[in-house]
Amino acid sequence: MKFFVDTADVAAISELNDLGMVDGVTTNPSIILKSGRDILEVTKEICSIVSGPVSAEVVAMKSDEMIAEGRKLAAIAPNIAVKVPLTWDGLKTCKVLSSEGFMVNVTLCFSVNQALLAAKAGATFISPFIGRLDDINLDGLDLIADIRTLYDNYDFNTQILAASVRTVNHAKDCALIGADVMTAPPGVIKQMANHILTDKGLEQFMADWAKTGQKIL
Ligand code: G3P
């Protein structure tokens, strides 16, 4: 499973990228707001750090304007994936931009039928939001599993980019279900390294090592 980082925090992206943990980056208007940066500038900077796909989202509601915004965002760098919402206008935009050879990430997906339409419109990525389904007492991971079945049934090339990943268990389950990609905040990716028995075991090893009186360096 590929790891995308769901942030526009350049320092956090760099830290994870240096560890080989970053296969791509996703942003959205809320993330740009949080960064306090200009969308074109920060996206360009991210693209200079990360070689994989960097999603940048259009904000127009009508397809003509979405397409124009998408072309402008795509001009930032060759690894831009234009992010469009899963609306009828977003699907039209997806079809046009993917036909022009651009990567397109269709976002705000909450149903299997939406994922089916996105694949037929040529989406490179479909972004089902796990956490936001969980928020309303539905099961976001069920949606990931259902889209996996759908895409495998018909050999769609669209990659499942599990989004709104809030916990380490979301990350684990996405990997077990077979999501192609998950995008998560840097904190969730770092938490994946934690285990209470690792901490406990290390504490014991360090205590015993101190008793040996030895040094390695
Ligand atoms: O990738 C989508 C993500 O940014 C949304 O996450 O936690 O706001 O639902 P969240």
Image: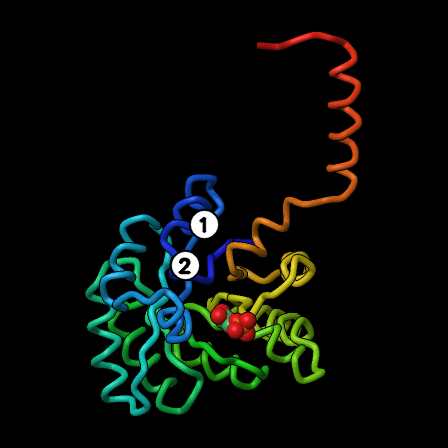
> Observer-nearest residue: 148 or 214?
214
On screen, 15 above or below 55?
above
Residue at horizontal 39 percent and vertical 57 percent from the top: 9
Residue at horizontal 66 percent and vertical 57 percent from the top: 168
- Which residue is the site of mark 2? 25
Residue type at tag 1? Val
How many angstroms separate mark 2 from mark 1 (CA)? 7 Å
Number of marks = 2
Identify the element where label 1 is drawn: loop
Q: Position of residue 11 (x, y in %)?
A: 38, 49
- Which residue is the site of mark 1? 22
Dots 2 and 1: beta carbons under 8 Å? yes
On screen, 141 above or below 20?
below
> Can residue 128 be seen here?
no
131 left or right of 85 in image: right
Q: Which mark is residue 44?
A: none
Colouring of the image? rainbow
Q: Position of residue 110 (x, y in %)?
A: 57, 82
Residue at horizontal 63 percent and vertical 49 percent from the top: 192
> Observer-nearest residue: 22 or 105?
22
Q: Position of residue 51 (x, y in %)?
A: 33, 50
Quick one: label 1, few (<14), some, or many (20+) residues within 10 Å?
Answer: many
Point out the image quarter for the N terminus: bottom right
Point out the image quarter for the C terminus: top right
154 left or right of 13 in image: right
